Amino acid sequence: MTAALLTQILAEPTFSVLRTREQLGYIVSASTWSLSGSSEQGLRIVVQSEKTPGYLEQKVEEFLEEMRSRLDEMTTEELEEHKTSLRKKWLEIIKNLSEETSLFQTHVTSGHWDFLRRMFSSRTKFFNLMI
């Protein structure tokens, strides 16, 4: 849940700072990352760029330090807004077959067919923590 909330908070700043301000590359994003067959999640920052890996790593580290300061200064109201936004996102009804397929794609390609883990246990934990 912490990784999902952190991703919710960092997604927009990752794009605006690393892509727009730092101009690191065309593709820049922050998302949750799961190890196949595991319930562990983390934060992934993707940057596709022509710049050297060392330079990119340095800029991402600087960004994360900047975000640490922002998180420390975040008000309770701002945090609640992010929680509410994440809650709404997770309660959205699947709109089409493509969205439903994407929920299961990682399980199918990895061979770890625990289809219920992400859909139900994560959301249940999330609501227990958030409510």
Image (spheres, rainbow, N blue to C red):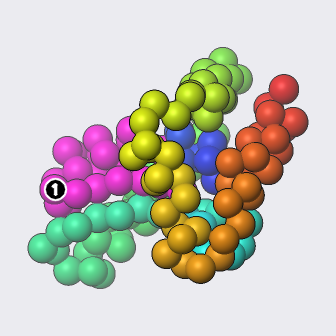
In the picture as drawn, the residue positioned furthest to the front comes out as: 97
The extreme top residue here reads 77
The residue depicted at 18 percent of the width and 69 percent of the height is: 49
Query: Up-down: is 106 above or below 66?
Result: below
Give the residue drawn at x 87%, y 36%: 128
When asked about the image quadrant of residue 79, the answer is top right
Q: For this rendering, which residue is in front, 26 or 63?
A: 26
State the SS at label 1. loop
- Which residue is at the front of the view, 51 or 7? 7
Q: Where is residue 101 drawn, in percent x and y? A: 47, 53
Q: Position of residue 90 (x, y in %)?
A: 62, 34
**x then y, percent, for residue 39:** 73, 66
Residue 117 colored magenta?
A: no
- Identify which residue is drawn at 64% across, 53% down: 3
Task: Tell me if I can see residue 38 in this picture.
Answer: yes
Q: Is residue 41 above or below residue 13?
A: below
Relative to 115, residue 54 above or below: below
Please state if 1 lies on the left or on the right of 42 as rendered. Answer: right
Of residues 97 and 17, the one nearer the viewer is: 97
| Left or right for 90, reference 15 | right
Q: In the displayed structure, would residue 43 be above or below residue 16?
A: below
Q: Residues within 10 Å of mark 1 (few under 14, many from 20)?
A: some
Q: Is residue 87 left or right of residue 109?
A: right
Residue 40 seen in this snapshot = no
Q: Amino acid at mark 1?
A: Tyr
Locate the C terminus and report the quarter of the image it occupies: top right
| Mark count | 1
Give coordinates of residue 55: x percent, y percent.
Answer: 26, 75
Task: Judge whether residue 29 is colored magenta.
Answer: yes
Start and end of the magenta stretch?
10-32
- For disc 1, the marked residue is 26
